[in-house]
Image (cartoon, grey):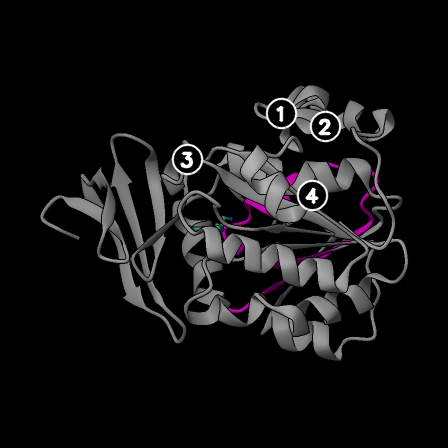
Amino acid sequence: MDGSWHHEVFRGQASFGLRVTEVLHEAQSAFQRIEVLDTPMLGTVLVLDGIFQTAERDERSYHEMIVHPALCSAPSIERVLVIGGGDGGTAREVLRHPGVKRCVMIEVDREVVEVCQRHLPTLGAGVWDDPRLDLRFGDGVAFVAETTERFDVVILDGSDPVGPSRGLFGKRFYENVRRVLGDTGVFALQSESPTVDEALFFDIQGALRDVFDHARPYFGAVYLYSAGLWTWTLASAVSLPEGPRPERLAPIAPGCDFYDADVHRAAFVAPPFVRRRLKS
Ligand code: SPD
């Protein structure tokens, strides 16, 4: 916080700031510094270790896009694993799919969930009491390394690769995700920005392509991340359809502001500099 502003500073070279009218919560958990800020621009905003994570009035562009391309194209969606996503926005979009029978969510920091339940209730609306949700607190890296459970879809909704999220990036973690998915499962993850951090984006793509037969980034914009292009990636052992399966899209489409069949197809069109590097 700088007076009545919060600035997210990137490598000491750039910053994005929001004016803050009130600090609603400020505490150090066992894992990270958690702040909840009231802002005129985006409403209530969650900040972890100084980094903007999600905002009441700018969350749908991210949560619809991390969930629906996977859930609308995967061969099966009965068993879904969400790693991270403590604000509840990702689980909320998962549970809008009537075909999901069970959603296990592994969040490392119980305090993030409690703080978001209190201050960002719209993100987890309908989630916390849904009998299909199995919320567990623990380390997602250890969970995928040790579990014997199998999932149709794994969604990684972590923060940047610093602090508690560091282990969620890299080949060893992706190999374990590949194992819990079996032969037809789909992995969806937030995969950072090729405009702001080109090296990190291509490292993630390279590691995914080492582990999965198919890995394709898709593109969108999230104002809060002030990154120009933001990306997510779908990775799987099977090739996926170019667009959503109509029977999956139909029940969720009326509640979407940022996702539909056209957006799905368009999002997978990569800019030339990405295509050249990925040779796809
Ligand atoms: N640069 C911040 C990226 C954060 C991505 N995850 C946000 C969590 C929203 N559920």
Mark 2 nearby-residue class (10 Å; few <14, some 14–19, many ≥20): some
The tag on residue 94 is 4
Say few, some or many: other residues with alpha carbon within 10 Å of mark 1 (under 14 / 14 to 19 / 20 or more): some
Residue kind at label 4, given as amino acid type: Val
Q: State yes or no: discs 3 and 4 in contact (Cβ < 8 Å).
A: no
Element at label 1: loop
Q: Which amino acid does label 3 sit on?
A: Gly
Please tell me the numbered disc located at residue 252. 2
Quick one: SS at disc 3?
A: loop
Query: How far apart are labels 2 and 1 at the CA level?
Result: 7 Å
Question: Is residue 125 in sight in this rendering?
Answer: no
Highlighted range, magenta = 81-109
- The Cα–Cα distance between marks 3 and 1, rounded to whole angstroms, is 22 Å
- Identity, as a three-letter code, of the amino acid under mark 1: Cys
Which residue is denoted by mark 3 in the rendering?
228
Q: At 69% from the left edge and 20% from the top edge, which residue is drawn?
A: 262
Q: Does the residue labelled 4 lie within 8 Å of ligand 1?
A: no
Distance CA(mark 4)–CA(mark 1): 12 Å
**Residue 170 as seen in the image, left or right of residue 247:** left
The image position of residue 141, as x and y in percent, is 62, 73
Q: What's the distance in space between the residues labelled 3 and 2, CA to CA?
A: 27 Å
Q: Do the residues labelled 2 and 1 touch (CB within 8 Å)?
A: yes
Q: In this view, does 135 lie to the left or right of 273?
A: right
Quarter of the image with the C terminus in it: top right
* Residue at screen point 9% across, 48% down: 3
Q: Which of marks 3 and 2 is in front?
A: 3
Q: Earlier in the sequence, mark 3 or mark 1?
A: 3
Mark 3 or mark 4: which comes first in sequence? 4
Judged from the image, the secondary structure of the residue bearing numbered disc 4 is: helix
Q: In this view, does 78 lie to the left or right of 228?
A: right
Specify which label sits upstream in the sequence, 3 or 2. Answer: 3
The residue wearing badge 1 is 256
